[in-house]
Amino acid sequence: MLSIASDRLMDTSSFIPARILATGEAGRWAHLSSLKRRPRRLRLNPALRRMVRETTLAPDDFIYPLFVTHGQHIQNEIGSMPGVYQWSIDRLAQEAESIAKLAVPAVILFGLPAQKDPIGLENFAADGIVQQAIRAIKHAVPELIVITDVCLCEYTDHGHCGILNAPLPLSTTGEGAGEWGQHPHLPEGYVLNDETLDVLAKVALSHAEAGADIVAPSGMIDGMVAAIRSGLDENGFDHIPIMSYSTKYASGFYGPFREAAQGAPQFGDRQTHQMDPANAREALREAELDVAEGADFLMVKPALSYLDIIRQTREQYPQMPLAAYNVSGEYAMVKAAARNGWIDEERVTLEVLTSIKRAGADLIITYHAKDAAQWIK
Ligand code: PBG
């Protein structure tokens, strides 16, 4: 046996002679017998693999986004997001029931208003589209958690996430007319921070009054959590949690969403408030502020190109519930490739969602929620 081993070691062509395989001596190489650790032992069959699995997905992990619109009998599929629809209120109850039946615990609402204006008045109107949707869903399926996105971009005629620095009075009629003046020291079109906070606080309060369970400010406006927290607390809603989009990047992956929610900026972009994709340390600073302001959940958005940020946020804030938003562009890419037959949709989707959870997210806002919940079952 020794001679065989030394033959082998000197043999630079490196093949195992047939006589060795036949006698089973290959496994007795000196260097192989030192292999005490063989990770493959725990991959031998499905049951073993299940026993050592570190990350599992459950429907409880998911939050499903819903787009709601005025009108009747509307179920409009979004071109760039196959399987995702804009719903009118009369169709919502049925959709909410089907989500709850899949054991997905929560939805997040985005509204398409009837009219847009510089402030986004429908955003905090008692009969606004989201307020109607909240009431319809809570009436039909009270146990389904309703989260609302709190931002201005779907409601403003300029498509920006806040009140803009404008040379003229922003509105001459309706609530809030003339309340917001011009700031000559800031660029025209700049998203004004503190003026926007007043509106965000009004919107969140209006959602809570309509019956929302959780409010989720998404505009990356400084102080948004503090402003919403005090607005809610002063009006008897200190029991309503805030899920802050604490770390949201200025991302190209929101493209399809802007078709779905009709909230694309009419000029410029969102880089003066959303984060630079190049930055990670700044993400922790953003999270730190939101924790201090009273956020109940943190969030990283988008998810897939930011798994490192999810991991770092998880490590920095082990005590905080952490959500990740698997955004529209991430969904669209999987759908498009699957439709072309280039990838296996179920396999890739579950792999994507698992990776987000493995990185450290507790919750995933995802357009795949219904499909994934079905596949997991
Ligand atoms: C802002 C908001 C956006 C998304 C969620 N909330 C758009 C944006 O910031 O431009 C994007 C979600 C997605 O792409 O799926 N209201």
Image: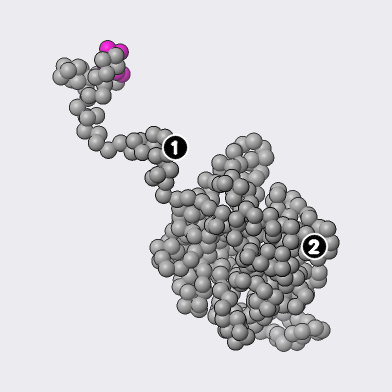
Membership of 17 in magenta stretch: yes
Amino acid, disc 2: Asp
Kindly give the residue lying farthest to the left in the view shown.
2
**Which residue corresponds to the image point at 45% horizontal and 55% vertical from the top-left?**
359
Most foreground residue, 54 or 250: 54
Tell whether 114 sits left or right of 308: right
Residue 46 — which label?
Answer: 1
Q: Residues within 10 Å of mark 2 (few under 14, many from 20)?
A: some
Measuring from the top left, give residue 324's x and y in whole percent: 54, 60
In the image: residue 231, left or right of residue 111: left
Taking the spot 74% from the left edge, 61% from the top edge, the residue there is 93
The answer to whether marks 2 and 1 mark residues whose Cβ atoms lie closer than 8 Å is: no
**Stretch in magenta:** 15-20
Q: Is residue 263 above or below residue 194?
A: above
Q: Mark 1 falls on what kind of element?
A: helix
Q: CA distance from mark 2 to mark 1?
A: 45 Å
Residue 90: give its label.
2
Q: Amino acid at mark 1?
A: Pro
Q: Quadrant of residue 155?
A: bottom right
- Up-down: is 14 above or below 71? above
- Can you say which quadrant of the picture contains the N terminus? top left
